[in-house]
Amino acid sequence: MQALQTLTWNDTWYLAPEIVLAAFTIALALLDLSLPRRIDRDIIGWGAVLGLVTAGVFVGWHIHDLGAWEKAGESPFRNLLDGSYRVDDFGNLLKLVFLGASALIVLASLGTVKKEEVPIKGEFYYLVLPAVLGAMVMASSGDLITLFIGMELLGIASYILVGVRKSSGLSGEAAFKYVVTGGTASAFVLYGMSFLYGATGSTRLSGIAQSIGDAVEGSKALVYVAFFLMIVGFALKLALAPFHAWAPDVYQGAPTPVTSFLGVVAKAAAFAMLYRLFVNTALYAYADTAQVREDLFLALAVLAAAAMIVGVAGALRQQNAKRLLALSGVANAGILLVPLTLDITSFHSSLFSEFIYYLLAYVFMNVGAFAVLTVVSRETGSEELSGFAGLYHRAPWTAAAMTALICSLAGLPVTGGFFGKLFILFGTVQTKQYWLAAILLFTTVVSYYLYFSFIRQMFMRSGDTERQTKVPMATGLVVWICAIASVALGVLPKPILEWVDGLFSVSLDFLSR
Amino acid sequence: MDITFAQYAWFAPLFPLAAFAILTAMGRGLGRAGAWVATAASLLSFLLSLLIAIERLGGTAEDYTGRIEWLRAGSIMLHAGYEVTNLTSLMLVIVTFVALLVNLYSIGYMKDDERISVFFGYVALFTASMLGLVLADNLLTLYICWELVGVCSFLLIGFWFRKPEARAAAKKAFIVTRIGDLGLLLAILLLYWNMPNHALDFTSLYNVFHSQSDTLSASLTTLIALLIFLGAVGKSGQFPLHVWLPDAMEGPTPISALIHAATMVAAGVYLVVRTFDIFEASQAALAAVAIVGAFTAIFAAVIGLAQNDIKRVLAYSTVSQLGYMMLALGAGSTAAATFHLFTHAFFKALLFLAAGSVIHAIHTQDIREMGGLGRRMKITAWTFGIGALALSGIPPFSGFWSKDAVLAAALDESPWLFAVGVVAAFFTALYMARLFFLVFFGAPRGDAKAYAHAKKSPAVMTVPLVILAVLALLAGFVETPWNEWLGSWLSGEEEEGGINGLVVIASVGASLLGLYLGWLFYGRRSSSGNPAAEKASGLRRILERKFYVDELYELAFVRPLAALGRGLDAFDRVVVDGAVRLAGRSVQAAGKLNTRLLNGQIQAYALCALLGAVLLILAIAGRRFW
Amino acid sequence: MTMLGSYLTLAAVLFCLGLYGVLTKRNAIIVLLSIELMLNAVNLNLVAFAKYGINASLRGQVFSLFTMTVAAAEAAVGIAVLISLYRRRATVNVDEYDELRR
Amino acid sequence: MLEDIPVLSILTFLPLLGTLITLLLPQSRVRFIRGTAIAFTFLPLLLAIALYVSYEPIVGGGAFAEKLTWLSIPLNTEAGLADKGATSYRLLFDYRMGVDGLSLPLVLLTGAVASMASLASVYIRKRWKLYYALFLLLQTGMYGVFLARDLTLFFIFFELTLIPMFFLIGIWGYFGREQAANRFLVYNGLGSAFMLLAFLILIATAGFSATETASGTTLSFSGSYEVLLANLADPNAAVNQDSIMYLSDNLKWTAFILLVIAFGIKLPIFPFHTWMLKVHAEAAPPVVMIHSGILLKMGAYGLLRFGAFLLPGQLQSWAPVLATLGVINIVYGAILACAQKEFKLVLAYSSISHMGIVLLGIASLNEAGFEGAVFQSVSHGLISALLFLIVGSLHERAETTRIDELGGLASVVPFTSGILLTAGLASLGLPGLSGFVGEFLSFLGLFDSYPWLVAVGVLGLLFAAVYVLRSVLSMTYGPLPDRFAAIRDVRFVEALPMIALTALIVLLGVYPALMTDMMSHSFDGLLKLLQSKVGG
């Protein structure tokens, strides 16, 4: 029996991003309490942004360190607490995505969140931080327990965030629905985890990886049950069809920035966890597990396909922009799931590059689109699609940026959305999953119609008012960052993919040792 | 003999083409000056043609061919070229001469029309294309010009575009002749892929078909010949594609003279002559040509009996005469056909121009409203009379000699064809007599005021009439039974002459009988209209309705096609587009269903999810057993 | 039946009961409690595996401790959300929480 | 001189520069914006003409080729390739441009039609700035499509035409514009989805190549047209070997049929044609000029470039199918054109009919047919552009283009009517005008193998005469209704493009060698492949 490894002072350095976030949360909470009422809580928001950026800097630092170690021949990852917590490139890259996305979201919401809507504005800002913290823990975990803790941290924080518009009955209803779904999902994941623990006798991912072969041999049923329960749980979390029905309701009821957060960060975190669980448990490693793996991945592929189809089809008749984007999120979750379900063959093992690239593109297009939606709904007081009518006349530049974002969402060149999809498609074709490629392509085509309903409204209809729409500076900045990034990702995907490929390694970062 | 002029033959079409370009570019600004530009161009062409013809009269000049590469698609080379032979030089002279006269005539005839420059532009373009057609050294070039003359014909028929009849006639002319054109096109395609070296020029055609080599199978040869003949049928208004030609009389009369009497309609005959080597290789094709020709000759002549429009009578006469030419060709005699083409060009142009003169004077085309015009328009009457006699085949007018040649050829082939020819000659004389007497004799029946205003046509119109009348009188002497100059010049071989008494007696007898009967019915008692016709009113109605061919076509083709169009249109809307809409709707409906499921009940969502999970697991597990 | 089997069966029954509650109960509080029931089934599972599993260790029990804590927090937030909602709607009937739809 | 500069890229991206400049100009300076747009439309045309002048047809084509490594995406090698000595494993999307006898005519067509459409944009009555910006953007897409020599690049340009077109239809069209725009988007999106799937299959198999260098083995997937062509023809390449890259017959068929559908939608092939009816009927005239004049040709181009060149075996087996489809298109389109009451729909169906001829040309599998297909594409592009220009002119004046409402226009607008008649005659394939040459070559090509189909297809020419004359004559001939009596003839800006297009149509009809010479040798490689297939 190995000795219990506890936290050391040394480890605090590796945990720096997480610690920074925790510290900022507490500090901002205290600040919020102590500040007089009359002071605008935007300052808390700026503080939150600062915290996110600081954490991001630390993550960047770690990435740099890990790279340096790899060059020096050391292992390019660190195990804390006997592998419960891992600092590796997989986690770090995702953390950067979480932090960046959250920073953009908070930035966009500065100045657009109405005080009447969210009376406890400060709370809204500093609650984002623990949610991100939870996501980061999920990305870095090497143990079922930490995974679960991260998941719940994210979950509980976001329950509150969804319900933060206390004055609105809708917000409360959304929060309640989210609690029930989230709780049920957690229960399923946990129940599955318990079986996985039972089958392998370990909660450590590396431990599971070592004994999963025997476990399959011993009691295949147990492994099946474990994974299927987890799949159901994750499908609920990710709102994959037919587990998606809650998403539009919750997204609609939540304040727009929170919706954006749920759509991007919460989803990405769940994906991080999926990767950890399905890849780190080394289902690839053994011949015995081939059948299990095949079944599980087929199930995931079917879910992905269903999500793409249902998400797009469901959004077709949608008149509410937020619900529309929620359903588009369902479809995009399906797309993001595709790389995971592809075989790893000697000629195809770029699944993570495919995933993170599309994730990145998705972050920008989604955050940007929600930011525009905030602006529009603030102006027109409506979250309906018709609120976009005539936006081109009222705010031509914002309309132009939105067009770029829409193109990215629809997967039209030359945008990140296009290239991300192309890359994923190439993976599916390489592994000869033509049916998946076909579904992806055809849902994409139908989604043209869907996303272009924004364009129809913005350019081809006239709105009720000709008054110029005022775009708050911070929000405008975010919109433009997102739009430009969306286009840049499409024109020059190479640097990022080069960088990711240089950092990331299947064997070192994915497969726990 | 040196070839000097032949190598410049390609200038002949170029002059009128340039005139066309000038007229089109300058537009209406040119006004009547445009008429002189076009006339000058046609004069130049005529002079050149004359020089070329004179050069060749000696009979020793080599055929001259010039060509350029028109289009190359890899190994496929298509040429555009011209060829000067005796036949083409003869045709050049005919075309340019008639064109020149018609141009002159039109200066007077069209002088009050505001679109006179457009008219002359079209005529110039027509002349250019017709000369191109005549000169073409290969079938493709010929085909191109063939279509162009068709278009000019179409444009000129519809020249008075405000008249709905003109519009309909133009459309009909184009579409009906196009049926024939497509036959020619298919023939060209067949020849292209079956001829050695993909050659389409007439020299190669001669070499291949004349040598009786079995390069092409007999059935293929027949098919090609029939397809070419289809083209000729369309262009030359042979039955059953004759329907457009009488309607084409909606165009200005000079056009009827130039295009629909003298030149373009004869292009079908010319085509068969040029490709006669192919026809000769197929007995069946020759028989078809002969039968169609003979039938058309008598069929159109009979219809001509009952028409009341002066130009329509002439039009049916043209159809009938073209039938004669085809008959001659079917009987194997290109010389007779060409000869008849030659003479017909003059006397029919004459007849039309004279008719135009009449119409110009009294502004009606209905012969029932004419009468007694001979006294007011002496020159017109005289020249018309000469033309009528020539057409009727009365010696020594040119028509006699050529009709004689045709009938002699027909007799050689089959007595039946000969008999049909003779009967047709009888009818020809009859309707010409009717026409002549009704128009120029008797008392005026129509609007007295118009009659009073009828005056002599200006010199620019009468001079061409006189020239043509002289030619109608004399042109026949180039080929008489004693002196077969034309035939031998064309074929390059000495031909044995000889007079066939039976032919002469039969044809002259039939014609004289026709004239006499015509005088009997219309000349003697002209004031009372046409008593003979009243007696047989049932037959007359059939004739007036032209044997109901138009109605039959309407019923057999136009309406079914329109119905098919509507049917397919409905199909396109309902089935094809319907399928698209259905697909769109079903996707939308799926979306709607999905939306309906989102009823706000969280427990329903959960149930849905649970069902989904169960289904998924069942599917994955079931896959193992399935 | 082995001990492990019995425990697992019991946990499964509990889980299904909880799930059933979530799916059918009209009272929002009972729905939240049903979720707790499902989490408790997990705890039972974990502890059973920790004791009778192939590689018996304390880990399962530790895991169950975490689960309980987190479940408590979750329940607290859930109830808080519910109270806030109740103030607005004056009902705890889940069926009536359907303003967000379509 | 042209060889020293990246002329193809300049040609392609000049309009894009125009877009940017247009966007920066103030909205109120309409004249200035229009001038800029027209200038940036004519500049590429001039370049294209310069290209034409200096173009030498050589075997293999690909003159003025440009190649830049654009995206070299690293692929992970850890799952086994690294052990096998692969030092580099990449997905290459190169920026490759090239021109040959197949694309040059279409580039010229694009230049000509776009320039004329830019002049015809006087019919646009609102939101000029956005209009011209999109108009220029569209041009970049079109040039790119014809010049790209990389599958992905081609696809990107292809899609790039989609977005501006959607706007152009949807904002500046007639009453049903939005529906038309939606149809356009979804249908063409569907087409591009088919295309992308086929492309990816090809890239993932035939695009694979392994090169040994001093530092190790470099493996790459490339979308480069040349690489694909070389690999597919090389029996030793991985794509033809029993390997993971093997492109089985089934896959080849899948790819081929996908391509046929993809480009068939664009072309359009019956029964995928209904979308373009809406576009023809509802979009603004200059937009339809572009659409009917150029965009439809991208279908023909793609089918030849990728369907024929990359998968000649499949083309060969499917030639009868394509030929039959072509004949169906010809006859079906023509009969339907006869039944329409709206002139724009007559033209739309006539486009379907004419594009059937392109299919015939492709299906003929010989040089006459291929060149005929390209010639027909160019010729139809010019003719339909001209016709829609006239439609615009008439619609502006008479406010209708229904043939049962119009009549006698030749009295009031003689110039327009004359041009209309000329265009109509060109459209029905009158020799001496460009329409004839393409039809003749295509029929000539196909006749060698399927004479009976040609015999049926020729019927289409007859119906063409019927529908052209029926519609043109009832609009321009006959008595003039009173309400049109005050109509005036064209302005100079409208007359100019009309004359220019007519002149081009006549020029190509009289001396087609101007274009066919350009195409010589462009099909040599393909023909050789086809012949070897027959032999083997």
Image (spheres, rainbow, N blue to C red):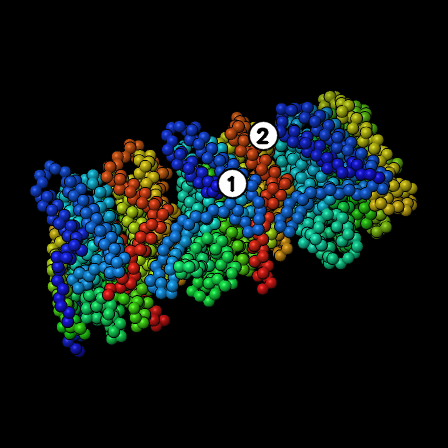
Residue at figure coordinates x 42%, y 37% from the top left = D17
Q: Residues within 10 Å of mark 2 (few under 14, many from 20)?
A: some
Residue B66 percent location from the top left of the image: 73, 42
Instruction: Return the residue at label 1.
Output: D2
Report the amino acid beneath label 2. Answer: Pro
Q: What element carries label 1?
A: helix
The chain to which mark 1 is attached is: D
Q: What element carries label 2?
A: helix
Residue B276 percent location from the top left of the image: 77, 49
Q: Is residue D154 left or right of residue B419?
A: left
The label shown at residue A458 is none
Report the amino acid beneath label 1. Answer: Leu
Q: In this view, does B44 lie to the left or right of D489?
A: right
Residue B520 percent location from the top left of the image: 84, 35
Which of the two marks, 2 or 1, is nearer to us in this view?
A: 1
Q: In which quarter of the image is the N terminus of chain A?
A: bottom left
Instruction: Return the residue at label 2.
Output: D414
Visible residue check, residue D292: no
Count every numbered label the image shows and give the total: 2
Which residue is nearer to you in this view: A264 or D467? A264
The chain to which mark 2 is attached is: D
Residue D423 percent location from the top left of the image: 58, 38
